[in-house]
Amino acid sequence: MAMKYALGMAAFVLLCLLGFSKAQATDEKEACQLFESFQSEWMKKLSQHGLYGPHKVSFEEMKGQKKVLARYSELGVVKDSQVKKTESKACPFVGVLSYEEKICESEGPSRAEAAKGPFSCATRTVTEVFRFVNGKWVY
């Protein structure tokens, strides 16, 4: 009798957990709120751990020329953020995040000269897509 009770309780708890997970994964309003927090943390991570800023200059020897190209990127502002519903039960939402990235370049006869600048910069838009799985946003 105790074994049946324990199995019944285990099944009940499992069903409750699955039901809670499913409700959590299908609530669009909550998914949108969670995406706002996620995107803020994501941009913070990129800023702290990404390859951004003038201190992260990369160099490229230009073949056939006696020039060096110095390049670095700067993280810009968020341009757009959307949560879209999908038909998938495993991934009921995707989040689309678009932000600016500034690419700065300078040429010179050596690395040292190229690194001095002046740098000319162009802006591009980066778009990333994230999945909402098991009640949370993942990359």
Image (spheres, rainbow, N blue to C red):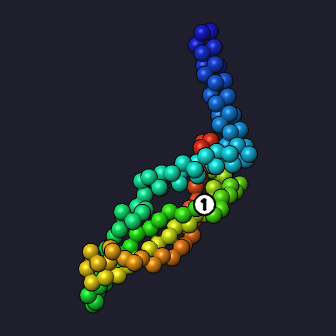
**Residue 28 seen in render:** yes
Along the viewing direction, whichever of 36 and 17 lies nearer the viewer: 36
Report whether 111 appears left or right of 121: left
Q: Count every numbered label the image shows and give the total.
A: 1
**Residue at the location (44% across, 68% down)?**
73
Q: Position of residue 27 (x, y in %)?
A: 73, 43
Residue 95 lies, with reference to residue 8, above or below; the image says: below
Q: What amino acid does circle 1 point to?
A: Val
Left or right, 103 with reference to 97: left
Horizontal side of residue 51 vs 100, given as left or right: left
Measuring from the top left, give residue 87's x and y in whole percent. Answer: 70, 55
Vertical position of residue 101 compared to residue 91: above or below = below
Residue 66 in picture, x, y percent from top left: 26, 87
Q: Nearer the viewer, residue 132 or 42?
A: 42
The relative height of residue 34 versus residue 72 in the rendered view (above or below) is: above
Residue in the image at 43% along x and 62% along y: 52
Q: Quadrant of residue 1?
A: top right
Q: Looking at the picture, how far across and down is residue 58, in whole percent?
A: 34, 70
What residue is shown at x 27% (from left), y 90% (from top)?
A: 64
* Residue corresponding to mark 1: 78
Helix, strand or loop at mark 1: strand
| Residue at the image position 65 percent from the left and 62 percent from the top | 80
